[in-house]
Image (cartoon, rainbow, N blue to C red):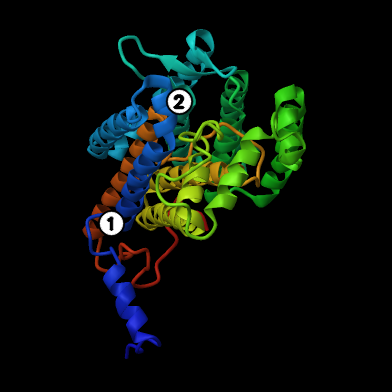
């Protein structure tokens, strides 16, 4: 006899909010689209004065961002129609594409603020950021690699280290740009995917020491990185030079208080806070919408990452390892980049040039992030279709098995 739920109202609410009988996870779509729309509003607000000063048109960056948003949604709709099997089969080619773009940007890339991160496309008013595409290519290759060599990754050092050699190639090319923030993001992503695949903990502890030592060397290798670290420790000591961005961002957070100054009423965006509509858009958001608005956006990112992880778990239960590890990789990249951007804006981490996924101004970041969301939806749709084709005893789409069953092959225990 089935036991009655302890809290019937909560059980009924959970049942109403559940998406297990739907064709896809609606909460994932809600979170992604909400962040995109909030991003458009905040880019419009944060860039109006800068755009008026540079171009004479206060809506210049808003219009460009709207175009980027339309192109990103179109690319996402196209990617949603591509089966995951295509990404799995072409993983090695995508890896070569990612490495090729990182090499190309070093040769013919456009230098902005001392970094070569963008490739100018002739005839198109759009600069492609190579590292954004490279992240997606690396995730797709890693998901296919883990599907093919999962038992060896868990037991053999050689299979465990091969992805790290590829990661080292990506890292060296990114450091040459330089793009230290992207190195941190892709390192965390690859290590996280290996951990989700069930690689032994002891290897990660050893590699953590190596990575920490390498990070320390990279931090002191360039004077500008040392200046960022010094300004991070005490930004007010040199608030008009190395600590300028951070102090202005902190002022924005302080002015925002609980409820904010009101949409469009930010003072820091008036040529005080550099990169207000790109890297530091979250600081302007906190100033205009206050603590409640900032926490709401963080909640949307948390919802997005939670649902992405849930997609990966459902794929594991459905014995679809490629979809599972692809979903985990996307969740890790979005989560890591969002955490670093927000932590930098609020003074918890040293300043890095990373955009806030789905929210900051920038065509490359928005385009790749939208395609990642489409891949998550595709993984979820294919997983639910596979589960429906199985017997009634198969796991339900919400990830809860209807009866005990054996551990599927290729799933981490």
How far from the left and from the top, in percent, is residue 357? 44, 40
- Give the tally of numbered discs: 2
Seen at 36% across and 13% down, the residue is: 121
Mark 2: few, some, or many residues within 10 Å (few <14, many ≥20)?
Answer: many
Q: Can you say whether 318 is above or below 221 in the image?
A: below
Mark 1: few, some, or many residues within 10 Å (few <14, many ≥20)?
Answer: some
What is the C-alpha distance between the residues marked 2 and 1? 31 Å
Q: Can you say whether 180 is above or below 375 in the image?
A: above
The one nearer the camera, 302 or 352, is 352
Judge left or right: residue 350 versus residue 194. right
The one nearer the camera, 310 or 84, is 310
Disc with the residue nearer the chain's start (2 vs 1): 1
**Residue 308 has which mark?**
none
Judge left or right: residue 101 versus residue 345. left
How far from the left and from the top, in percent, is residue 56? 36, 22
Q: Can you say whether 227 is above or below 55 in the image?
A: below
Give the structural element (helix, strand or loop) at label 1. helix
Choose top left, top right, bottom left or bottom right for residue 42: top left
Seen at 53% across and 34% down, the residue is: 354
How far from the left and from the top, in percent, is residue 44? 37, 37
Q: Please give the residue where the numbered disc 1 appears in the rendered image.
A: 26
* Circle 2 or circle 1, nearest the eye: 1
How far from the left and from the top, in percent, is residue 346? 60, 47
The one nearer the camera, 16 or 277, is 277
Q: Is residue 269 visible?
A: yes
Judge left or right: residue 367 versus residue 230. left
Q: Please give the residue where the numbered disc 2 appears in the rendered image.
A: 95
The quarter of the image holding the N terminus is bottom left
Give the structural element (helix, strand or loop) at label 2. helix
Q: Is residue 92 visible?
A: no
């Amino acid at each position: 006899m089935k036991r009655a739920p302890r809290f019937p109202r909560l059980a009924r609410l959970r049942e109403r909010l559940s998406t297990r009988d739907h064709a896809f996870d609606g909460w994932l779509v809600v979170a992604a689209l909400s962040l995109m729309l909030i991003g458009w509003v905040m880019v419009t607000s944060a860039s109006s004065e800068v755009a008026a000063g540079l171009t004479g048109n206060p809506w210049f960056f808003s219009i460009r961002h709207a175009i980027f948003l339309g192109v990103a949604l179109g690319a996402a709709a196209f990617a949603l129609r591509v089966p995951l099997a295509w990404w799995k089969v072409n993983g090695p080619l995508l890896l070569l594409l990612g490495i090729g773009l990182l090499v190309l940007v070093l040769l013919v890339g456009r230098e902005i603020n001392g970094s070569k991160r963008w490739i100018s496309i002739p005839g198109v008013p759009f600069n492609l950021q190579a590292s954004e595409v490279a992240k997606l290519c690396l995730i797709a290759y890693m998901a296919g690699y883990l599907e093919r060599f999962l038992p060896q990754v868990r037991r053999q050092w050689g299979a465990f280290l091969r992805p790290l050699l590829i990661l080292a190639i990506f890292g060296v090319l990114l450091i040459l740009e330089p793009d230290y923030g992207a190195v941190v993001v892709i390192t965390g992503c690859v290590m996280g995917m290996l951990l989700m695949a069930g690689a032994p903990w002891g290897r990660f502890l050893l590699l953590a020491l190596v990575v920490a030592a390498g990070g320390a060397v990279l931090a002191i290798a360039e004077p500008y990185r040392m200046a960022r670290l010094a300004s991070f420790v005490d930004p007010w000591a040199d608030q008009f030079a190395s600590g300028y961005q951070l102090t202005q961002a902190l002022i924005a957070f302080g002015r925002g208080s609980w409820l904010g100054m009101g949409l469009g009423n930010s003072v820091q965006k008036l040529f005080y806070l550099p990169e207000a509509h790109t890297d530091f858009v979250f600081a302007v958001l906190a100033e205009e919408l206050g603590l409640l608005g900032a926490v709401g956006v963080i909640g949307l990112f948390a919802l997005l990452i939670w649902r992405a992880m849930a997609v990966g778990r459902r794929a594991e239960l459905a014995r679809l390892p490629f979809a599972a590890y692809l979903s985990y990789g996307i969740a890790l990249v979005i989560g890591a980049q969002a955490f670093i951007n927000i932590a930098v804006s609020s003074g918890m981490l040293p300043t890095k040039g990373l955009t806030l996924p789905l929210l900051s101004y920038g065509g490359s970041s928005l385009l790749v992030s939208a395609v990642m969301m489409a891949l998550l939806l595709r993984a979820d749709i294919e997983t639910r279709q596979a589960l429906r084709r199985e017997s009634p005893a198969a796991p339900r789409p919400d990830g809860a098995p209807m009866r005990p069953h054996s551990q599927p092959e290729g799933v981490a225990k």
